Image (cartoon, rainbow, N blue to C red):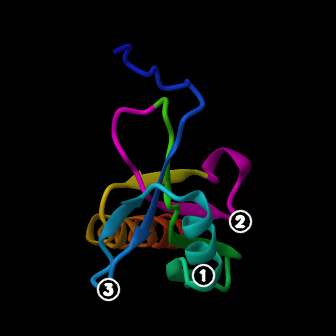
């Protein structure tokens, strides 16, 4: 029997269980329904005076090019283009800790002006 090769564009799809832990699903339709029916943003911090927003959300897809599965992403928007970045995390706890560190770092930068 010949082993099936995985195409380079192959992605893995995940949903969250009741405790917000990623669970891989193999039916793309099931994944799509879950993604549209559930809240994907876990934390959003808007720093009003500066217009900066930090958002942490569940992606639900792992990219085939990366060895590490980063299903949560924290994005910074509203700063100078070079500072608008995204950071991946494997777990919700890791993502929320990362979110807080980023917000505190931005607050320190803003108050140092």
Question: Can you identify the residue that label 1 sits on?
Answer: 47
Q: Give the image quarter of residue 72.
A: bottom left
Q: Secondary structure at mark 3?
A: loop
Q: Give the image quarter of residue 20.
A: bottom left
44, above or below 21, in the image: below
Q: Nearer the viewer, residue 74 or 67?
A: 67
At 55% from the left and 24% from the top, the residue drawn is 8
Do the numbered discs 1 and 2 sit on residues whose CB atoms are within 8 Å?
yes
Q: Secondary structure at mark 2?
A: loop
Give the class, few, some or many, for how many residues have Cα within 10 Å of label 3's Cα (few <14, many ≥20): few
> Residue 26's spot in the image, x, y percent?
46, 55
Question: Can you identify the residue that label 2 sits on?
Answer: 78
Q: N-terminal of the two: label 3 or label 1?
A: 3
Identity of the residue furthest to the top in this view: 2
Question: Can you identify the residue that label 3 sits on?
Answer: 18
Tell me how far mark 1 sits from mark 2, CA to CA: 10 Å
Q: N-terminal of the two: label 1 or label 2?
A: 1
Q: Nearer the viewer, residue 109 or 45?
A: 45
Q: N-terminal of the two: label 2 or label 3?
A: 3
Q: Secondary structure at mark 1?
A: strand
Identity of the residue furthest to the front in this view: 1
At 62% from the left and 64% from the top, the residue drawn is 29
- Look at the image and give the residue range highlighted in magenta: 66-84
């Amino acid at each position: 029997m010949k082993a099936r090769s995985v195409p380079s564009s192959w992605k893995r799809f995940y949903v969250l269980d009741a405790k917000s832990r990623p669970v891989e699903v193999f039916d793309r339709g099931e994944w799509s329904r879950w993604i549209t029916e559930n809240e994907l943003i876990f934390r959003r911090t808007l720093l009003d005076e500066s217009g900066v927003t930090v958002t942490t959300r569940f992606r639900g897809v792992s990219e085939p090019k990366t060895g590490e599965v980063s299903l949560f992403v924290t994005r910074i928007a509203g700063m100078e283009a070079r500072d608008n970045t995204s950071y991946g995390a494997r777990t919700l706890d890791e993502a929320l800790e990362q979110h807080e560190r980023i917000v505190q770092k931005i607050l320190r930068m803003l108050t140092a002006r």
